[in-house]
Image: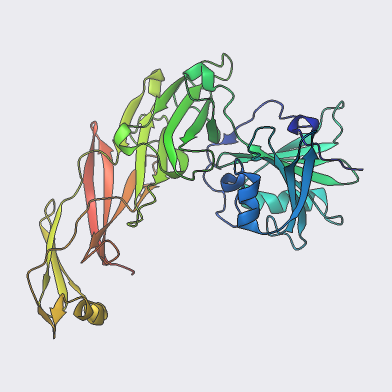
Amino acid sequence: MRRFGVIILLIWISWGPVTFESASTVGQNQARLIAPLHPWSVLGLPLGDLVQRKGEGTVVFEENTQEKILSRVDYTETWFGLDQPVKAHYLGSTTDPKTVQQITLNFPAGVTRQELIEQISGFLGEAEQGKSDPSAPAKYFARWLQKGVRYELQDFGEYMEMYILPAWFSGAENYSLPGKTYLMQKAAADVTGDGKNEQVLLLAERFEDTALFLRHIFLVIEDPQSGKGICQRLPEETDGGYDPQMQFHDFNGDGIVDVFLAAATGGSGGLSYYHIYTFADGKTVLLFSTAMKPWISVKGKFLDGYKAEFTIQETNQTHTIDLQNRRSTYEEIKVYRNGKLLEPRELLWLGGYSLITPVDPDGDNIFDLRVIQVLKGVANYDSIAEIISLLHYQDGQWILAKVEVNPAGE
């Protein structure tokens, strides 16, 4: 018979030694609906707020000498795209007010362990898995880490359960980081060039326990043998963001992979912050940041006849965009009247980065940056054109190698 303790320590969780994904698989997890509410937004939430968001569930109270205290809320819901619903138990903390400290899932009978692991891996990426320690009550385990949340599946033979917990970084004190620092992503890669893989950890601090926006983002590079390492916080002006991710590519051609970081800003313009760090020979160098000088400058204006004209100053290219498909909107907001501009109006060039993608056009394993920036019309929602640049790192600086222009939406 399964029992859910009010205190989290009553549940067996054995993480064992931490292993790291290979660099080639990092960042390939599918962005799909894991649960009705993502664990990242639920863990740390007061139980009362959980009920308000999810509706009535089966509530379990802890009784003391003075009052009954809500300690757990149970729901039947769909997780990981499974055909059958699961029993989800949202367990409260020992603190007051009670917050969601752990989510426990009971999986339905009839699904095999391998089928379940494959299904979950489609959402969370490749699992660390194997036989449990002989002293553990479970026979087999599978573990995942994604976006600051740990997932542990335990196969007890007669039934399978998953325990979902915040992915706290246990080594925060070693780097003078806040106690509530989350491990967002982990990988093994040789980023120093010593011929051995380092542990590369992407860490973050939230504004509040359930805030989606991250206040600070950190990179830790550790020697797996000694446990010693370096911690690098992102530049202040481009620190923070949503859903940070990292990849590993060689950008400067030294034969050592660098760390490429991306985090969405969350603004209405759909922009993101990007950084590239190199740790060759154990020295930290910032190769690229969206806070660096703009790579291209654009000036433009509206023309009569529902058109826009703009010039990219670095290439001295002038482009004209047909805006007939926005005719009714521009007439309604009084930009045009019968095709005539009511007053001179410039286009909006904010210079932000909508998307930066590492690319290897030459196939030489030295990567360039494909940069997409969006030229706006009357406001941030009014995208006129996509300006696509190719940046190549050479002789210690980024060089503008190519520029393309496409009407927005094509």
Q: Is residue 167 visible?
A: yes
Q: Describe residue 139's horizontal placement relative to residue 30 as left or right.
A: right
Indicate the position of residue 332 as horizontal and vertical percent values: 22, 80
91 to 347, vertically: above or below: above
* Front residue (pair 222, 49): 49
* Residue under the image location 61 percent in, 54 percent down: 37
* Front residue (pair 70, 260): 70
Q: Describe residue 94's horizontal placement relative to residue 284 as left or right.
A: right
Indicate the position of residue 309 as horizontal and vertical percent values: 13, 68
Residue reaching furthest bottom? 338
Indicate the position of residue 260 as horizontal and vertical percent values: 41, 38
Quarter placement of the C terminus: bottom left
Q: Describe residue 236's horizontal placement relative to residue 257 as left or right.
A: left
Q: Describe residue 149's horizontal placement relative to residue 110 as left or right.
A: left
* Residue under the image location 75 percent in, 44 percent down: 162
Quarter placement of the N terminus: top right
Q: Is residue 318 visible?
A: no
Residue reaching furthest front? 66
Q: How many marks?
A: 0
* Front residue (pair 298, 265): 265
Residue reaching furthest top? 226
Coloration mode: rainbow
20 to 373, vertically: above or below: above
* Residue under the image location 15 percent in, 51 percent down: 297
Indicate the position of residue 374 as horizontal and vertical percent values: 27, 59
